Every structure is written in C-alpha cells, then in structure tokens.
Image: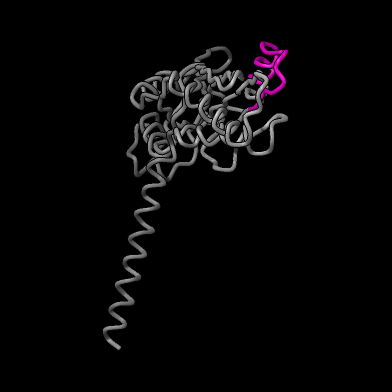
Amino acid sequence: MIVNELLSGLVDVRIYCMLFLSFDYICAVQDFFHTIQADASGLFKDRGSKFYAYARSVATEQEAQLFLTEIKKEHIKARHHCYAYRLGLDDNNFRANDDGEPSGTAGRPILGQIDSAELTNVMVIVVRYFGGTKLGTSGLINAYRESTRLAFEAAIRIKKIVEDRILLTFDYSLMSEIMNAVKKIDPVIYRQEFTEYGEIEMGIRQSETEETMLRFKALVMNISLEEAKAIEHIAGCKVAFLG
C-alpha cells in the first residue's frame, strides 16, 4: 500500500513537472515567429511543364488575396495558380488551394513545405504551365513541393517578435513625465503626433507588456512598482491596446 502511494505520488509529480515545463515552453515561444524577409521565387521543370513558385510574407487574408490577384495578372495565360498560406500562431489559420489540379496534389504539398520550414505569415503561389505530358499524382505532388522548396531556398528567413501595439494619448501637462518614461522602457515607436493632445503609438514585446507597462506607470507617477500595481489609470493619460 505504501509503495503504491509513493509510486502514485511520484507519477503525479512527474506529470505536474511535465505540464509545468510544457507550459513554460509554450509561454517562451508564443511571442515570436519565423517568416521571410522579402519576396522570393523558384522554378521547377518536369517533362516540359514549368512550375513558377512565388513566396511572400503576408499578415492577413486580404494581403494574401492581393498577392494572388497580382500573380494572376502576371500569368494571365496560365491555367493553374495553386497556393497555400499560413497566418499567425494559430495552427488553424491556413488555406491550401489546388486551383483545378487533382485534389491534394498542389495546395497541400505547398503548405507542407511552409510547415517543414516552420514559417508563418507566408504565402506561396505556384503557377503551372503545362508541357504536354501528364505528370500523374506523384509527379504533381513532387513538382509543387519542389518548386516551393526552391523558392524558400532563395528566401531570407527572419525572426519576428509578436508585439502589442499601444497608443498613448496624454495631456501636455504630462509631456515631460511621459517622454522620460517612454525613453526608459524603450519600446518600438511607430508614430508620434502632437496636436490637441500628445499621441505616441508604440510596440512592446507581447511577453513583456504587463511588466513594461507597470514600469511605465511607476515612472510617470514617480512611485514604486508595488504602489503602481494598486493604481488602475494614470490621470491625464489614456492607454489603448490596438492589437
């Protein structure tokens, strides 16, 4: 009985440790991702058919649609403009389209290469010009996969930080305190505008937002971090999260 309890307790501890480590790992990686720095392309040929692959970093479905429209205009005579994209850190935010090719022979192989490269916010469009010889299912899968791989070989892979965009709107009476605090927390500044009110649009690494904004509050009000925790708003300064 005692042995069983000890073993049971040991299993519980192991499970707890595994869950803790997994949670810690997830928290550590959720605020960055890899994508490509600029447009890249690749060309694959097989038995007369040509497969032109175009890769681009996109952040929204609207950007993906604009990219597709652009490539279709460039290759207006092509019969197939197959594509795939993956957006954000949500594993469910993707799309794969065969555009008339046999089901599963184009979009999915393209998406598979995106996932193999561990990229997101990326779209690849592969334009096919038929060369007169049918490639069969395996041939098509290989062609769409290889053309995408060649485009990624030509691309520059970069790491991007997931940020919280924050807009500060403040009275001029707080100008000195706000500017001093912003300088010390050192965010990415996207916009500064000084009209009726002062406005600063800034970006903070998502995993550091809570701690950084607490420091900002303490600096503006010239109080300790512990005191800042008890204060919800800074009088004369509005903080809006833009996403």
Q: Is residue 16 above or below residue 125?
A: below
- In the rendered image, the quadrant that contains the C terminus is top right
Point out residue 114 in the picture as x, y percentages from the top left corner. Answer: 51, 32
Residue that appears at 42% across and 32% down: 205
Residue that appears at 45% across and 22% down: 174
Q: Is residue 131 above or below residue 19?
A: above
Q: Is residue 179 left or right of residue 70?
A: left
Q: Quadrant of residue 74?
A: top right
- In the rendered image, the quadrant that contains the N terminus is bottom left
Point out residue 185 in the picture as x, y percentages from the top left corner. Answer: 36, 27
Does the magenta run of residues contain 81?
Answer: yes
Q: Nearer the viewer, residue 186 or 144?
A: 144
- Judge whether residue 236 can be spotted in this image: no
Point out residue 242 in the picture as x, y percentages from the top left corner. Answer: 56, 30
Q: Nearer the viewer, residue 96 or 240?
A: 96
| Magenta stretch in the rendered image | 67-82
Q: Is residue 80 left or right of residue 126?
A: right
Point out residue 100 in the picture as x, y percentages from the top left corner. Answer: 73, 30
Q: Nearer the viewer, residue 226 or 2?
A: 2
Q: How is the image coloured?
A: one colour
Q: Residue furthest bottom?
A: 1
> Total label count?
0
Q: Nearer the viewer, residue 165 or 47?
A: 47
Does the magenta run of residues contain 174?
Answer: no
- Judge whether residue 219 can be spotted in this image: yes
Residue that appears at 40% across and 52% down: 23
